[in-house]
Image (cartoon, rainbow, N blue to C red):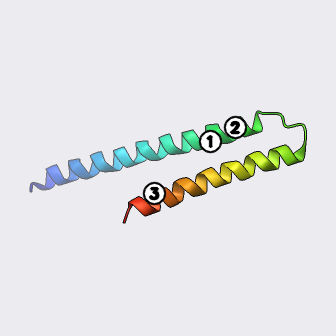
């Protein structure tokens, strides 16, 4: 393959990965902001929402790790 073509393909893949990472971080940041924005009446409610958020992230991570095999 032509070296210029390889460089172009590499740049395209890197840009796609960067865009996906930005989208992923935007999603989780918005989810976390939603938790903070709830104005919990008690600390227990906030703790429960944060634990749920962590569980969702852990589930997603396990799913991704499992599908990469």
Does residue 39 appear to the left or right of 21 in the view shown? right
Whole-number angstrom distance, CA of label 3 to CA of label 2: 24 Å
Mark 3 in CB contact with mark 2 (< 8 angstroms): no
Q: Which residue shows up at 75% across the image and 45% down it?
A: 49
- Looking at the picture, how far across and down is residue 58, in whole percent? 59, 57
Q: Which residue is labeled 2 in the image?
A: 33
Q: Which of 32 and 49 is in front in this view?
A: 49
- The quadrant of the picture occupied by the C terminus is bottom left
Q: Nearer the viewer, mark 3 or mark 2?
A: 3
Mark 3 in CB contact with mark 1 (< 8 angstroms): no
Q: Which residue is labeled 3 in the image?
A: 64
Does residue 35 appear to the left or right of 13 in the view shown? right
Whole-number angstrom distance, CA of label 1 to CA of label 2: 6 Å
Q: Residue 53 carries which label?
A: none
Task: Classify 10 Å Cα crowding around label 1: few (below 14), some (14-19), many (20 and above).
Answer: few
Q: In this view, does 39 lie above or below 57?
A: above
Q: How many marks?
A: 3
Mark 1 in CB contact with mark 2 (< 8 angstroms): yes
Secondary element at image label 2: helix
Q: Which residue is labeled 1 in the image?
A: 29
Secondary element at image label 3: helix
Secondary element at image label 1: helix
Badge 3 or badge 2: first in the primary sequence: 2
Does residue 66 appear to the left or right of 43 in the view shown? left
Q: Which residue shows up at 78% across the image and 33% down it?
A: 38
Q: In which quarter of the image is residue 68?
A: bottom left
Q: Quadrant of residue 66?
A: bottom left
Q: Nearer the viewer, mark 3 or mark 1?
A: 3
Q: Which residue shows up at 22% across the image and 47% down it?
A: 8
Q: Which residue shows up at 62% across the image and 37% down it?
A: 30
- Looking at the picture, how far across and down is residue 45, in whole percent? 83, 44
């Amino acid at each position: 393959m032509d070296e210029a073509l390889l460089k172009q393909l590499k740049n395209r893949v890197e840009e796609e990965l960067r865009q996906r990472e930005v989208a992923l971080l935007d999603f989780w940041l918005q989810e976390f902001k939603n938790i903070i924005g709830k104005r919990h009446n008690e600390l227990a409610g906030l703790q429960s929402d944060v634990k749920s958020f962590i569980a969702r992230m852990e589930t997603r991570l396990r799913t991704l790790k499992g599908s990469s095999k």
